[in-house]
């Protein structure tokens, strides 16, 4: 139970792994997830480490898998996720995986290349088919095309002083629909109006073989005269990326060509369907094992990355690693090492040796699916020091409750509870879906937090009597208007009630106020004009009480840290002044709130002073305010004493503690000089000399520790060899 309220006790351990068993041992430790490897090669470049080639091979396999995954998503094929966690393949299986991925990648690339070529050919034939059809329609619209050409030629000949008729040439092609207006203007300006353009839209969009997008295009035919205009027209078409196709001049040739094009389109469509079916079969087969492949490759990559953190002895037969691990899980780590050694078939067992170190261990808090969300909230503000009190267990209650104090609505709380309950009940199925939606994953990770927030919101909503911003009349109202008719000195009547928009009920009149409401807030406040004044005052006082209690509780937790780390100075000059300061000011304010609630009733509530003004006057030592009477006898003396105590705590925390720490620091240096037997023992060394001696002292100890470590390492290596 102690591990829940305090971070785990960690230890530094040294691992001696046989070269043939290191891969499997690291794999088992990774599955266990209870060790943190230290980098023993910080000065070695990542490209110069032993297993860099294996890491590159894993990255190459990961790249091929991402390519296949992209093709699967493009084909809208769902990836099968059985939820299994496959074992890490052995290093000798890497060759088979590489061959499988290489074959799959090459096959998909070849299919894509062939399919793109077929689609391009299909697009050209489709465009040619539309050109032949539209061109025939253009010529059919004219009653006598030859006569039209001859008359046009005669007109041109008469203008040029020639009597011989000239025939018009033409080109036909396809262009994107959005480029038609610019295309027309360019033809008119460059050719000076000496061309004749006819165009028609293609109803069905055509697929771009490169991008797969649907493109709207139009068919055009341009009539011109002379080779010079022909050259200009072709250059303009080329500049606008228009596709030109050969078009016969006679109707019979166009008809025969159209029949041949239709036949080729049918054959090409059949080949395209077969190619797409084959591609779908390949991708569907790959989608069934895609997730398993990803897990295997990434586990292998992580193992080789970890092995690159280890040292290798001169004989290349043993790997040395240093890890941080929880003391409570040492048996599990030993068992994982034995299991990894057995998997590898090695006869030499792996050795784990606990090491003594002065380095600060990392902070590790064990979590489960319920506490992980709250632990993440705490870690977002800062990870505590090693073996400090972990505030996450207390956050399980305080965080949802303080949220509910601010939220406080039965209706919305019910909706939150139902939504979170759905996520909790179906969590196993939702986990198996592996959603990539970042927003959903964030909400799903905090499902237990949302569940508790919803439950607490329902509770505070009942206290506030607030459901979708409306009050519920569950027990009737505790206020009554009838006694005001008979109150002494009251002149209320039915006319008074109907003609006045706002009336103030007097709780001192018997029968008007029947005492506190059974649960929550009286629903009559929902129609009162001073509703916000009453609710804001009530919620403000409640927030002050809860906030001060929360702060005092947080400061009290530091006492357990000081006691655990045996720091009495922090207790007497840190914790006690802090708790006294907060209690003298804010704790006293909470007591005033509680006292005011109990000291005044319906008859004396009009004479109750303002606590806010009281607190301000207390801090300013102002007790001559006639508008704010004292709450009790001896209030001035007590408040002056509390403020003086609070002010005295400030220098105690900021000055006295600093001076004591400096004195302890100088005393340690002087004590270290005495231990070394220096010449200046009586008078003590200077600070610089003491610092040098202290450094030499620590260096000697570190050298002794390194010597002991080297002796142990050599002994283990001799045993392994």
Image: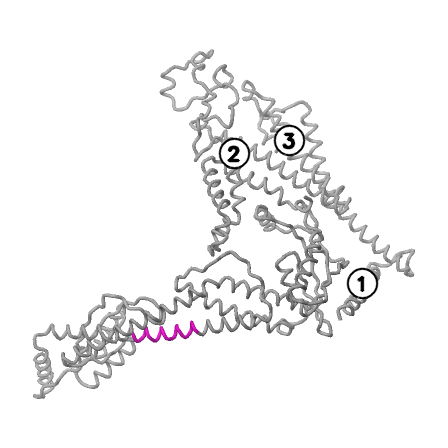
Colour scheme: one colour
Crowding around mark 1 (Cα neighbors within 10 Å: few <14, some 14 to 19, many 20+) is some
Q: Nearer the viewer, residue 109 or 504?
A: 109
Please give the residue where the numbered disc 2 appears in the rendered image: 460
Image location of residue 284, percent across then percent down: 42, 64
For residue 569, side relative to residue 62 (left or right): right
Q: Which residue is tagged 3? A: 622
Which is more N-terminal, label 3 or label 2? Answer: 2
Q: Residue at x 61, y 22 (%)?
A: 599
Provide the residue span drawn in magenta.
Answer: 107-122
- The image quadrant where one finds the N terminus is top right
Indicate which label's residue lies in the foreground, 2 or 3: 2
Which residue does the image show at 61% across and 30% down from the upper left? 614
Q: Against 372, is 36 above or below?
A: below
Residue 479: image tag? none
Q: Which of the two discs, 2 and 1, labels the residue nearer the N terminus? A: 2
How many angstroms separate mark 2 from mark 3 (CA)? 38 Å
Q: Is residue 110 magenta?
A: yes
Q: Secondary structure at mark 1?
A: helix
Q: How many C-alpha atoms fall within 10 Å of the one at disc 3: few (<14), some, or many (≥20)?
A: few
Q: Earlier in the sequence, mark 1 or mark 3?
A: 3
Q: CA distance from mark 2 to mark 1?
A: 60 Å
Query: Residue 147 location in percent, x, y?
Result: 7, 80
Q: Position of residue 372 (x, y in %)?
A: 58, 49
Q: Main secondary structure of the magenta part?
A: helix
Which is more toward the observer, 376 or 94?
Answer: 94
Tags 1 and 3 touching, CB below 8 Å: no
In the picture, the disc for residue 705 is: 1
């Amino acid at each position: 139970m102690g591990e829940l309220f305090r971070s785990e006790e960690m230890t530094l351990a040294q691992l001696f792994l046989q070269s043939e068993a290191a891969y499997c041992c690291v794999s088992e430790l990774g599955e266990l997830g209870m060790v943190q490897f230290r980098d023993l090669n910080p000065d070695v470049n990542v490209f110069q480490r032993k297993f860099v080639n294996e890491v590159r091979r894993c990255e190459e396999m990961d790249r091929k898998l991402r390519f296949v995954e992209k093709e699967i998503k493009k084909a809208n094929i769902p990836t099968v996720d059985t939820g299994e966690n496959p074992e890490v393949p052995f290093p000798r299986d890497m060759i088979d995986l590489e061959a499988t991925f290489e074959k799959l990648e090459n096959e998909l690339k070849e299919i894509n290349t062939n399919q793109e070529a077929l689609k391009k050919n299909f697009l050209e034939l489709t465009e040619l088919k539309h050109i032949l059809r539209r061109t025939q329609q253009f010529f059919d619209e004219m009653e006598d095309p030859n006569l039209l050409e001859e008359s046009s030629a005669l007109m041109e000949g008469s203008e040029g002083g020639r009597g011989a008729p000239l025939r018009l040439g033409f080109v036909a092609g396809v262009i994107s629909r959005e480029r038609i207006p610019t295309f027309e203007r360019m033809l008119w300006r460059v050719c000076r109006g000496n061309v004749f353009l006819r165009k028609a839209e293609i109803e069905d969009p055509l697929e771009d073989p490169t991008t797969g997008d649907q493109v709207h295009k139009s068919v055009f035919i341009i009539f011109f005269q002379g080779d010079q205009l022909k050259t200009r027209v072709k250059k303009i078409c080329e500049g606008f990326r228009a596709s030109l196709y050969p078009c016969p001049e006679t109707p019979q040739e166009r008809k025969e060509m159209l029949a041949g094009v239709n036949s080729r389109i049918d054959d090409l469509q059949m080949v395209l369907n077969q190619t797409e079916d084959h591609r779908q079969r390949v991708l569907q087969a790959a989608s069934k094992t895609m997730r398993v492949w990803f897990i295997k490759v990434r586990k292998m990559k992580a193992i080789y990355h970890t092995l690159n953190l280890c040292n290798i002895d001169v004989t290349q037969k043993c790997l040395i690693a240093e890890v941080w691990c929880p003391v409570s899980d040492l048996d599990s780590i030993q068992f994982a090492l034995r299991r990894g050694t057995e998997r590898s078939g090695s006869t030499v067992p792996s050795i784990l040796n606990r090491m003594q170190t002065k380095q600060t261990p990392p902070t590790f808090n064990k979590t489960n699916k319920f506490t992980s969300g709250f632990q993440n909230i705490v870690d977002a503000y800062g990870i505590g020091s090693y073996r400090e009190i972990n505030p996450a267990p207390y956050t399980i209650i305080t965080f949802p409750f303080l949220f509910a104090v601010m939220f406080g609505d039965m209706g919305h709380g019910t909706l939150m509870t139902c939504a979170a309950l759905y996520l909790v009940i179906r969590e196993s199925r939702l986990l198996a879906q592996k959603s990539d939606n970042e927003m959903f994953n964030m909400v799903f990770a905090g499902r237990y937090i949302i569940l508790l927030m919803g439950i607490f919101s329902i509770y505070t909503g009942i206290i506030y009597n607030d459901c979708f911003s409306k009050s519920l009349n569950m027990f009737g109202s505790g206020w009554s208007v009838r006694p005001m008719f008979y109150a002494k000195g009251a002149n209320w009547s039915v006319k008074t009630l109907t003609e006045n928009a706002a009336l103030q009920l007097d709780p001192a009149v018997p029968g008007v106020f029947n005492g506190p409401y059974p649960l929550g807030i009286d629903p009559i406040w929902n129609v009162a004009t001073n509703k916000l004044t009453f609710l804001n005052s009530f919620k403000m006082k409640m927030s002050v009480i809860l906030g001060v209690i929360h702060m005092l509780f947080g400061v009290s937790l530091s006492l357990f840290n000081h006691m655990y780390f045996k720091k009495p100075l922090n207790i007497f000059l840190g914790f006690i002044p802090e708790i006294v300061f907060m209690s003298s000011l804010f704790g006293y304010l909470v007591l005033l709130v509680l006292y005011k609630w109990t000291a005044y009733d319906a008859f004396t509530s009009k004479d109750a002073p303002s606590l806010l003004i009281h607190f301000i006057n207390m801090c300013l030592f102002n007790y001559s305010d006639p508008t704010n009477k004292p709450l009790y006898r001896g209030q001035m003396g007590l408040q002056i004493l509390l403020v003086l105590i609070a002010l005295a705590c400030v220098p105690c925390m900021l000055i006295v503690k600093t001076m004591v720490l400096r004195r302890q620091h100088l005393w340690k240096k002087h004590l270290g000089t005495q231990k070394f037997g220096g010449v200046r023992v009586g008078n003590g060394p200077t600070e610089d000399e003491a610092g040098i001696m202290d450094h030499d002292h620590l260096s000697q100890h570190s050298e002794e520790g390194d010597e002991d470590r080297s002796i142990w390492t050599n002994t283990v290596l001799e045993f392994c060899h």
